[in-house]
Image: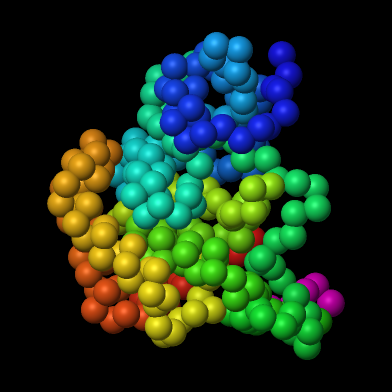
Amino acid sequence: MTAEPAAVLAEEDALELLGHGTIEIEGRLVDASNTTLRAEISLNGVTRRCVYKPVRGERPLWDFPDGTLAGREVSAYLVSRATGWDLVPPTILRDGPLGSGALQLWIDEPEDAEGLIGFVPAYDVPTGWFPVAAARDDDGDAYALAHADDPRLARLAVFDAVINNADRKGGHVLYPATGGIHGVDHGVSFHVENKLRTVLWGWTGKPLPDEAVATLTRLVSDLKGPLGEALEDHLTLSEVQHIGLRVKRLLRAARFPQPPQDWPAIPWPPI
């Protein structure tokens, strides 16, 4: 069966499809470090692709409890939904062909989608882009890891600081035809220790946008209510409490965070 053209699904319709649709695995995404499967999911005549990450396929990590990465993927979606920024595709936890796992709506990118993060010649960083790290290719030519000064990426940078994302690679940012952006692969997030690693350091120390301040202020309240309760289904009480602490620190500083001094600031590979 071939998935129908990816017309945009309303969020609630996407969640209904993910929660109750029939899953048919197509194959494995071989570049992923954990078992990551592409599948088709169908319900009432509607078929879409999705990403299925079974808990049993998670590779043990020294700093995250075993079997928790799928729940962290779902938690990232819950926080994204609370912000209203639509940064994470609809994601749920459910049983699948290989047991319980995270199920996320597949995001198609147009062939002509222009990325906002990448390596560019060090002498030719595009106007309106921030260089964040220096690099050289195999021939010794100088390049810069850089990203655009784009408000959509700025939202993602704030979001990553809230969830303590330890792996914001450039390749984890998608550019759907809707004109927004999506971040994916949030399994190593929400640690109680500072583990923020990202390629989005261009705004370091700059004032937070007013909309970010308003959104963070609302999150403080939401974390005391239904959002906090929903997150406790996937995270420890301490991890949920630390989300609130990070939000309050961001609000007190009213600035984008500084790179950590005791932890690599940029993931590897960056893209």
The colour mode here is rainbow
Residue 263 screen position, x and y as percent = 40, 72
Residue 89 shows in this picture? yes
Quadrant location of the N terminus in the rendered image: top right
Residue plotted at (64% across, 48% down):
178
**In the drawing, does residue 103 fall left or right of residue 112?**
left
Residue 269 screen position, x and y as percent = 61, 61
Instruction: Work out whether residue 98 or residue 227 is closer to the camera in this orientation and state it.
Output: 227
Residue plotted at (26% across, 65% down):
217
Look at the picture and state if 62 lies above or below 157.
Answer: above
Quadrant location of the C terminus in the rendered image: bottom right
User: Which secondary structure class fits the magenta region best?
Assistant: loop
Instruction: Work out whether residue 182 or residue 131 is closer to the camera in this orientation and state it.
Output: 182
Q: Residue furthest right?
A: 139
Residue 53 shows in this picture? no
Look at the picture and state if 268 lies above or below 23.
Answer: below
Residue 59 screen position, x and y as percent = 45, 40
Indicate whether residue 248 is drawn in magenta: no
**In the drawing, does residue 105 fall left or right of residue 95?**
right
Q: What segment carries the magenta color?
A: 135-140
Residue plotted at (79% across, 84% down):
124
Q: In the rendered image, which quarter is residue 236 located in?
A: top left
